[in-house]
Image (tube, helix red, strand yellow):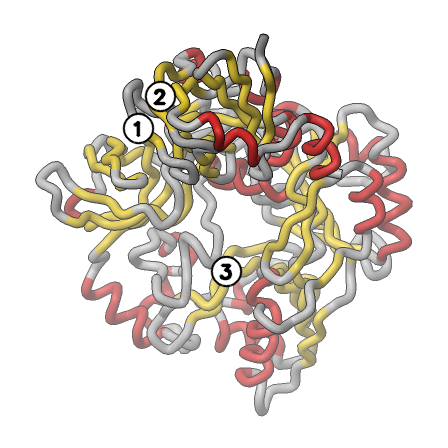
Amino acid sequence: MATTYYTEDHEWLRVEGDVATVGITDYAQEQLGDLVFVELPETGKSLSKGDTAVVVESVKAASDVYAPVDGEVTEANETLSSDPALVNSAATGDGWLWKMKLSDKSQLDGLMDEAAYNAHIG
Amino acid sequence: MAGEETKHLPLEDLHQKAGARFGAFAGWSMPLTYPAGVMKEHQHTREHVGVFDISHMKLIELSGGGAGALLDRACPLDAAALPLLQSKYSFLLNDAAGILDDVIVTRLGDDRFMLVANAGNAAEDEAHLRRLAEGLDVTVNPLDRVFLAIQGPEAEAALNKAGIATEGLSFMHGTEPRADWFLTRSGYTGEDGFEIGLPEKDARELLEKLFADERVMWVGLAARDSLRLEAGLCLHGNDITPDTNPVDAGLMWAVPKSLRAEGRFAGADALRALIARGAVEKRVGLKPEGRQPVRAGAALFDADGNEAGRITSGGFGPSAGHPVAMGYVPAALAANGTRLYADVRGTKVPVDVHALPFTPHRYRKG
């Protein structure tokens, strides 16, 4: 059964076994506005917590999405290359950004659950 | 703007009620987008009517027997030759012919003109005009007005329905339909449209009538930027600055031929020298390949990796359907179709020099 975690940078991670699917929250996509381009990471790329994993571009500006934990990219959501607006319409579903194999599952302990995240965005 | 307090629009409550997301621009808290979002706001303006609160911009009235003489000193503009009610795009230049601001000047009477200044430059423009006005019989009067842009193919119909007559007003002309009102047919979107300066109370009444019409939508600064960029119009501070000049910027169409040789405006000697020298670099449109936007500040390179200019404005063009940008390139690389490369976070994105505008202007020239 998957567990979902949230970060202060408005990302969500859905963890199954030692693989996490990562995306941005609905709150984040609303703040960013209409997305027109998503720069995706390459499969196999090694990420450390805090690295820029993805760049999402709205009409007006580019914003970094950081790796919430350490790990290796196992898949990027290639659908976003042709349909970046999927992040706006389905941020927590089909608009996921990448999947990563976790190197240190204990890092998940520092993240928020849904209730804590909802309190965080007020 | 550091240290100065953020300025707020007189109609801020209306924007809040409309659900605007605010952001800072030129010292002002401005509506960036409304709940419809930048894409829809942009496209709605191209198809119907978008209303923009541009009260951050400043209307400066110049009146008195020396008003024309002041403009002759301040702008590469033949004030005496400007027909009544006609508007003209012009500049305030520094001594090196750098562009301090781009302005629109409208003749409202024999000795009376209206100048529209950009928000971030308004205070300096006013001081500059006052310095140049020394010894002349002229009053420089910055007005306290709400300023609205009503833009799009159905702007005229919406204004008429709201009781504002626009008949006979063609593009780049302005009138004063009521006391303390200033109405011009002009804009910053490439579409037909109007800009109207008026007292706050009148503005609230007009907006209530306008928004009773379902063709009318609030449009924020984000779409204002994408609309003007597609239309190939310059943003002062980005595409033109005190360090760029009308020759390199490709804006000499705004300088009357007679004044190029004989004008006595501020910066005239330097401009003559630049004309004789010719453009070293040129402002051009740039179309990035693919979907990735290329933003202001990105450096440009030629195929051999040599530096080849810079992007000054860039983003996504919702009507164009692809990223759009503007920038300066060496004059030898300014031909349409020239392939260059923009550095985006270390990746070289191919960009082609492209004709401006990206979307055709649809002005109503009457």
Which residue is labeled 3 in the image?
Answer: B102
Which mark is on residue A46? Answer: 1
- The chain holding disc 2 is A
Q: CA distance from mark 2 to mark 1?
A: 6 Å
Of badges 2 and 3, the one in the foreground is: 2
Q: Residue at x 52, y 27 (%)?
A: A35
- The chain holding disc 3 is B
Query: Nearest the camera: A13 or B363?
Result: A13
SS type, badge 2 = strand
Where residue B135 appears, x then y in whole percent?
58, 91
Q: CA distance from mark 1 to mark 3?
A: 49 Å
Which residue is labeled 2 in the image?
Answer: A73
Q: Amino acid at mark 2?
A: Val
Q: Residue furthest top?
A: A1
Q: CA distance from mark 2 to mark 3?
A: 49 Å
> Could you tell me if residue B128 is visible in this image?
yes
Q: Residue furthest left?
A: B304
Q: Residue at x 32, y 31 (%)?
A: B288
Q: Residue at x 78, y 43 (%)?
A: B15
| Left or right, B301 with reference to A9 | left
| Left or right, B345 with reference to B318 | left
SS type, badge 3 = strand
> Could you tell me if residue B365 is visible in this image?
no
Of badges 1 and 3, the one in the foreground is: 1
Q: Amino acid at mark 1?
A: Ser
Q: Quadrant of the N terminus of chain B?
A: bottom right
- The chain holding disc 1 is A
Q: Residue A49: which quarter of the image?
A: top left
